[in-house]
Amino acid sequence: MAGEHTVGVYPLLDDDSCYFLAVDFDEADWRDDARAFIQSCQALGVPAALEISRSGQGAHAWVFFGDRVSARDARRLGTAIISHTCSRTRQLKLESYDRLFPNQDTMPKGGFGNLIALSLQKGPREQGFSAFVDANLHPTLINGRSLRPSSR
């Protein structure tokens, strides 16, 4: 039955590469910090998409790559954008920044790296969460269909 399971992905591949980078924002100022990060991506010419997390209490900024890149390079890109954001906004650090996915540069022995839930999960999306949003944190359109929760 639709919506009964949460689906996730391990971004770190066996060869220490990945197809995307996700930046996790949680805590009190996540809205402002996530928006500032996305603005930095735009200023630097890095395409990124912002998603409200499943709980509605945070966000993920997603950067997708056209081909595999080393996890180390992906994480360096994320760190550089965070540094740029901090200097641009004159903050010492983004208080709500939690972590990068993938979490590691290399595959841990006997492990898979860290799991991240995929976007557009049925239950949370019906509440306006787990959805991609615009700069005002309103759900965006996909294939001409609004991702705003239905009013039932």
Image: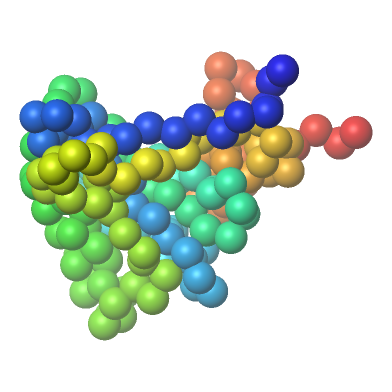
Classify residue 29 as left or right of residue 73: right
Could you tell me residue 66's position as x and y percent? 20, 23
- The one nearer the camera, 16 or 42, is 16
Could you tell me residue 31's position as x and y percent? 51, 63
Note whether residue 89 is visible: yes
Residue under the point 66% across and 41% down: 124
Residue 128 in the image: above or below residue 67: below
Residue under the point 38% across and 76% down: 95
Could you tell me residue 44's position as x and y percent? 20, 50
Could you tell me residue 58's position as x and y percent? 52, 58
Q: Quadrant of residue 40?
A: bottom left
Classify residue 2 as left or right of residue 121: right
Q: How many marks?
A: 0
Q: Residue furthest right?
A: 152
- The one nearer the camera, 123 or 33, is 123
Q: Quadrant of residue 16?
A: top left
Quadrant of image for the C terminus: top right
Note whether residue 41 is visible: no
Residue under the point 42% across and 60% down: 25
What's the colour scheme? rainbow
Residue 126 in the image: above or below residue 25: above
Quadrant of image for the N terminus: top right
